[in-house]
Amino acid sequence: MFHQFLISMLVSSLTIAVIMLIKKVFRKQLSAKWQYHIWLFLPISLLLPFIPRQLVDFDIPYHLSSNQLVENVNSSMETRSRMSENNNWLQDLTISIQDSTPPYLDTIVGSIWIAGMAVLTIFMIMAWYRTKRLQNNMRKLKNQEVLQLFEQCKQKLHISRKIHVGESPRIATPMMCGLFKPCVVLPPRLDAWLSLKEIQFIFLHELYHFKNKDNWTNYLMAFFQVLYWFNPLIWIAVREMRLDREIACDHAVLQCLDEQGQTEYGNTIIHFVEREMRIRNFRFSSQLNGSKAHIKKRIEKIASFPTDARMSKWNQMVIMMLVGMLVVCQLPLVSVLADDNQRYHFQAERALYEDFSDYFAGYEGSFVLYDMKADQYQIYNKEKSIQRVSPDSTFKIFLSLFALNANAIDLNHSTIKWDGIRYPYESWNMDQNLKTAMKSSVNWYFQELDRRIPPDQRQAYLKQIGYGNAKLTAGTTPYWLESSLKISPVEQVQLLKAMYTNEWGFEETHVQAVKDAIQVGENNGNLLFGKTGTGTVNNENQNGWFIGYVEHKENTYFFATNIQEGDNSNGSTAAKITLAILKEKGIY
């Protein structure tokens, strides 16, 4: 939630800044109409943070400093290490990642955001109710001359739709309101102090609001004000947008008038300012009047009308295209910042969905099994099976293959000397080779392998095998430990199968070396290969994996189990769940 808050704040602010900058730079070249239309890019950009991730994914490596993850080894890990020193592969060895973001921050930010939207929604509903009651209670005009004049104005603007016109003592300025039943509402006895010509100006102005669908824009921007209530720039932008909208309608009317009529039109607006106005909150309407500051700007624009907009229509369209391009250029930024809890688009005709909920009691998770001979998937929890989460230590399988292929280590010299740092597991505090490091999931060994592979080559390997979202951080924290790299259980199974059959064209000896390193058991001639993974954040287990395959004489079964949101959501628990399911199916 905090992440989404930052994205929406940044994107909305950038768009408003871009629009205001373009308006300022080209203020003498853009007509009033285009000055208003340029704001229509704002609602488009405000939707960007909520566009589905797959539509804006530009595959840009990134690192979020606001969620910097660093390794944290503390005394509480010593107890767990003593429990794990029995060389049992089921006891997954891991260390905690310290998340600098307080765990309660999302709850606080989310609660404030929702509370703000709720309060503002109430005010918006009240404004809508006032507008609706105004429509329902307005009195029908009796002055036939004024009614006939209204129909003439409609014909002049080529408007055929039925629009009601009436008056109400609840308002002091003419306004256009209503979406499906549009109406023009006038203050009472308007014909007593305005001439028919001045009333004609008012009708033309309000009908231009209808023609431009400004009431629909009112509702749309009210929605975004609720959604982005926390950003003061949104409120400023909406206010400026309303002013530009009124100026655009003013200029549309002025184009219908001669020079004398233009002067009289400006005086008509001034008449409303001179009278005692009672401005009320009819947010979902387009009002002729406004604040004195806005009226002043409108009068200045009316006075400068003949010299407004010196560029041609095509040049103005080029400027609009420039703004559009600048808005579109924010898509990569959204791709970089967007929540990385994405999903894998899995399409498999030969997939059976089964219920193994009894094995996952107390956990949210998924189990995926692939029968290579039958070419069939068996899946528990369809949604979770395609949800991408951190791979944690299961990534070490593929990192080992990358390291061998990049000559970071070789088959005969895979030993790396211990760096002398004391770790919470005794099995880590010694020299390691590929097999021992994989067996004890030695983090420092695989971090060293990662450092020996050039970043560009590492990224190329991820793309080559199609590993999850293939996102790497720019920091020193392992990107596979509750950080940027994400993968789904279905993808884990697909990658294991691709590695087993060497679909990527790596050296066969390298593939076999990795297979040998992840062999963990044998039962009645059936071989079990696998790797656990645990995501521990702030000393709490949040993500548990067990992935691998069972090799029979005539068939091979690939599996991936992931668990979350329960006590002991770790690799050991995921492995026990997996073994129980495999036993039930008679696979291992």
Image (cartoon, grey):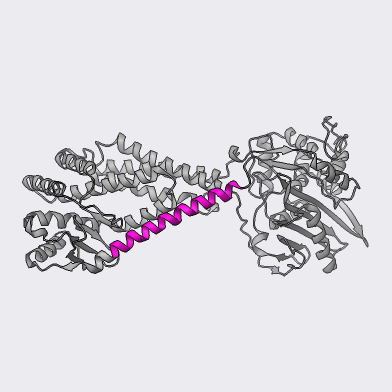
Image spot of residue 37 (x, y percent): 30, 48
- Please say whether residue 266 is visible from this viewpoint: yes
Q: In the rendering, at what x and y percent does residue 566 appear?
A: 72, 57
Q: Residue at x 28, y 40 (%)?
A: 315
Is 554 within the magenta? no
Q: Is residue 338 visible?
A: no
Q: Is residue 430 left or right of residue 24?
A: right
Give the image location of residue 501, x and y in percent: 78, 54
Of residues 158 and 140, the one drawn nearer to the viewer in this rendering: 140
Q: 526 or 70, which lies in front?
A: 70
User: Measuring 50% from the left and 50% from the top, which residue is drawn there?
Assistant: 112
Q: Nearer the viewer, residue 414 or 534?
A: 534
Q: Is residue 385 above or below residue 328?
A: below
Figure quadrant of the C terminus: bottom right
Q: Is residue 117 magenta?
A: yes
From which residue to which does the magenta span run?
Answer: 104-132
Give the quarter of the image for residue 211. bottom left
Residue furthest top as drawn? 420
